[in-house]
Image (tube, helix red, strand yellow):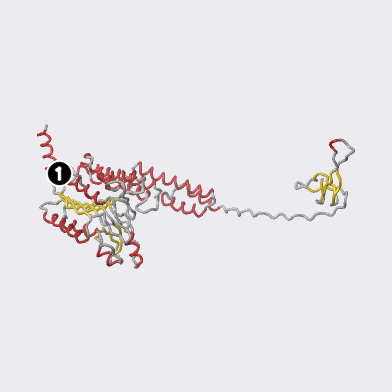
């Protein structure tokens, strides 16, 4: 049995090494921020655990770095590039980073994604020049992989976008720097790009756990061997699904793959015969993304994509896809319900906004005409409160009998006019219920 296990291990080792695999893994936790230690709990652990998995299970030669400054960061990149240049055959190249990251502007005013090394203590960058000088552009790494591994598989995984370091943001903005945000879109031609969260948003660490949410779920999926034989898009789609489910869609990972077909075991390049199944898998992954947009009410607007555009893209690939068609119907139904609710409350401006969105979803919706008619009905003016002017009292003489005119036009009970003053009521000589005699004051003008 021992020999059989050894043979299986040798076969596996030959299989995974059929194409050389190189990875650069970096994790930065101990950021020095003015007035605050700036320590991130997870990144170094994330990088160490990723390195162990890539080395021990997936056959990668790994260059690693933890809590590195810019000089060491660049040194590790050059070492990684050298491995790719010297590879005799096209390789599988993977760059993984966990730490601070954000987007900004370069000196040409172009959007750029930055990975943050450890800055000198109490000396964060405070303007655009020092920003570019002190950080690492992810485009620089991608360009190197394209150049030195032109015919190979290139992948970049970024568990960053944890929000810009607070000390830097404050000083940078005080100096007149532009706003900093989550990552922006990059050219994915020839490179598989995976982000811990949707473009423009922040990802989350977990202070009481060893790993961040994203890397924790990615390690979980990569540890399940059935996923080694699946296309890389399925691996990261499953990771995205688990992260979104765990965070209740507060964090939704995103990836971009431009024609890359790769799996970690037995199929560095998938055969042409599987093209149809790949398309089906891609649609399945996209439908999950559409569902997440719908649940988050990103129907026709939203950062990182919308349900409408997502379902429309699916229908371009498969015009009769039942789930995508049903998804568009659900979007339409939701807008119809919102319009009806707004109109019932007299909120015409809100109803107009929803109608514009409904027109985007289905310009031929039969509900649109009915809603337009309702919009034309003038809203009745609010009822103004009426001031009741009291009628002047009539003059009466003492002892005179009179009746007031009621609202319905009839006359009320008979009233007798009594002069103001006082009088005695009762009789000490009468029955018990007439005793004692009381002095009564009458100050009103009349009583019944």
Q: Position of residue 61 (x, y in %)?
A: 15, 49
Q: Position of residue 128 (x, y in %)?
A: 29, 66
Q: Residue at x 54, y 53 (%)?
A: 376
On the question of residue 171 being in view, the answer is: yes
Q: Quadrant of the C terminus?
A: top right
Q: Residue at x 86, y 47 (%)?
A: 423
Whether 127 is drawn above or below 37: the answer is: below
Q: Nearer the viewer, residue 300 or 272?
A: 300
Q: Residue at x 35, y 52 (%)?
A: 305
For label 1, the crowd category at 10 Å Cα-Cα, with few meaning under 14, some 14 to 19 and many 20 or more, is: some
On the question of residue 142 being in view, the answer is: no
Q: Position of residue 268 (x, y in %)?
A: 17, 46
Q: Quadrant of the N terminus?
A: top left
Q: State the SS at label 1.
A: helix
Q: On the rendered structure, is 150 left or right of 347? A: left
- Which residue appears farthest toward the top when viewing the image? 1
Q: Nearer the viewer, residue 421 or 259?
A: 421
Q: Which residue is mark 1?
A: 16
């Amino acid at each position: 049995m021992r020999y059989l296990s050894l043979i299986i291990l040798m076969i596996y080792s030959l299989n995974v090494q059929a194409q050389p695999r190189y990875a650069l893994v970096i994790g930065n936790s101990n950021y020095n921020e003015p007035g605050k230690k700036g320590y991130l709990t997870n990144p170094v652990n994330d990088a160490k655990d990723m390195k162990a998995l890539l080395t021990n299970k997936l056959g990668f030669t790994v260059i690693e770095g933890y809590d590195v400054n810019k000089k060491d960061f660049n040194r590790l990149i050059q070492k990684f590039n050298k491995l790719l240049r010297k590879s005799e055959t096209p390789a599988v190249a993977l760059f993984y980073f966990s730490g601070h990251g954000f987007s900004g502007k370069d000196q040409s005013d172009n959007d750029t994604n930055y990975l943050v090394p450890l800055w000198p203590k109490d000396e964060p960058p405070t303007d655009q020049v020092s920003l570019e000088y002190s950080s690492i552009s992810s485009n620089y790494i991608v360009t190197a992989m394209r150049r030195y591994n032109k015919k190979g598989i290139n992948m970049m995984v970024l568990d960053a976008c944890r929000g810009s370091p607070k000390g830097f943001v404050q000083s940078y903005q005080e100096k007149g720097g532009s706003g900093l945000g989550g990552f922006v879109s990059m050219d994915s031609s020839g490179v598989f790009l995976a982000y811990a969260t949707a473009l423009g948003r922040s990802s989350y660490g977990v202070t009481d756990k060893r790993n961040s949410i994203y890397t924790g779920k990615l390690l979980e999926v990569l540890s399940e061997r059935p996923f080694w034989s699946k296309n890389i898009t399925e691996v990261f789609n499953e990771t995205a699904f688990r992260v979104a489910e765990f965070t209740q869609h507060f964090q939704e990972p995103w990836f971009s793959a431009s024609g890359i077909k790769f799996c970690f075991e037995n199929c560095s390049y998938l055969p042409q015969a599987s093209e149809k199944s790949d398309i089906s898998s891609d649609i399945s992954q996209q439908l999950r993304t559409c569902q997440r947009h719908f649940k988050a009410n990103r129907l026709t607007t939203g950062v990182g994509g919308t349900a409408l555009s997502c379902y429309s893209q699916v229908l371009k690939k498969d015009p009769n896809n039942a789930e995508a068609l049903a998804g568009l119907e659900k979007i339409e139904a939701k807008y119809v319900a919102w319009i009806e609710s707004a109109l019932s409350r007299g909120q015409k401006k809100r109803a107009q906004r929803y109608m514009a969105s409904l027109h985007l979803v289905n310009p031929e919706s039969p509900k649109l005409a009915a809603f337009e008619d309702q919009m034309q009905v003038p809203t009745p003016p609010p009822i103004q409160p009426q001031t009741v002017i009291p009628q002047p009292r009539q003059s009466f003489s003492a002892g005179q009998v009179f009746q007031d005119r009621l609202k319905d036009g009839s006359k009320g009970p008979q009233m007798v006019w009594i002069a103001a003053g006082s009088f005695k009521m009762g009789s000490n000589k009468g029955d018990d219920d007439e005793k004692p005699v009381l002095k009564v004051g009458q100050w009103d003008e009349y009583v019944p």
